[in-house]
Amino acid sequence: MAWTPPTKWTVIFSFLILVGGMFVLSELLLEYTNVLPPLALGAFSSAEVWGMIAMGLVFIAWFLMFLGVRLKGL
């Protein structure tokens, strides 16, 4: 499969998602401003839920960039 450069939209959108995920992770680990509201779901604590959200955002950013490189026109 050939390599194609991703479009500017894909790069910018992927970068913004990655920044959001990294912000949540850094907020959880370093506790800069304590901006994140409590969000406990089921048996998971608030930190675990925010951690899952942050890891999901980082994965989505990576996957979008992967698709942007592998597929033409994305």
Image (cartoon, grey):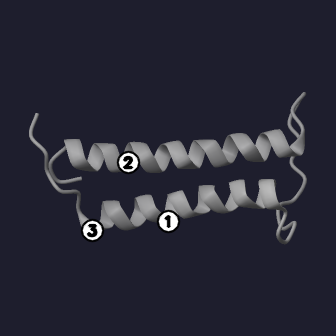
Q: Amino acid at mark 2?
A: Leu
Left or right: 20 in relation to 46: left
- Circle 3: element type: helix
**Which disc, if any, is residue 57?**
none
Residue 45 vertical position relative to residue 68 in the rendered view, above or below: above
x and y percentages locating residue 4 in the rendered image: 14, 51
- Name the quadrant of the N terminus: top left
Nearer the observer, 29 or 74: 29
* Residue drawn at point x = 86 percent, y = 33 percent: 44
Q: Which residue was labeled with disc 1?
A: 16
- Circle 2: element type: helix
x and y percentages locating residue 45 in the rendered image: 90, 38
x and y percentages locating residue 31 in the rendered image: 84, 63
Marked residue nearer the N-terminal end (3 or 2): 3
Cβ atoms at labels 2 and 1 below 8 Å apart: no
Residue 28 vertical position relative to residue 51 in the rendered view, above or below: below
Left or right: 40 in relation to 55: right
**Which disc, if any, is residue 64?**
2
Left or right: 11 in relation to 54: left
Q: Which residue was labeled with disc 3?
A: 8
**What is the C-alpha distance between the residues marked 2 and 1?**
11 Å
Left or right: 31 in relation to 20: right
* Residue drawn at point x = 23 percent, y = 48 percent: 69
**What is the C-alpha distance between the residues marked 1 and 3?**
12 Å
The residue at the far left in this view is 2
Packing grade of label 2 (10 A; few <14, some 14-19, many >=20) is many
**What is the C-alpha distance between the residues marked 3 and 2?**
12 Å
Q: Amino acid at mark 1?
A: Leu
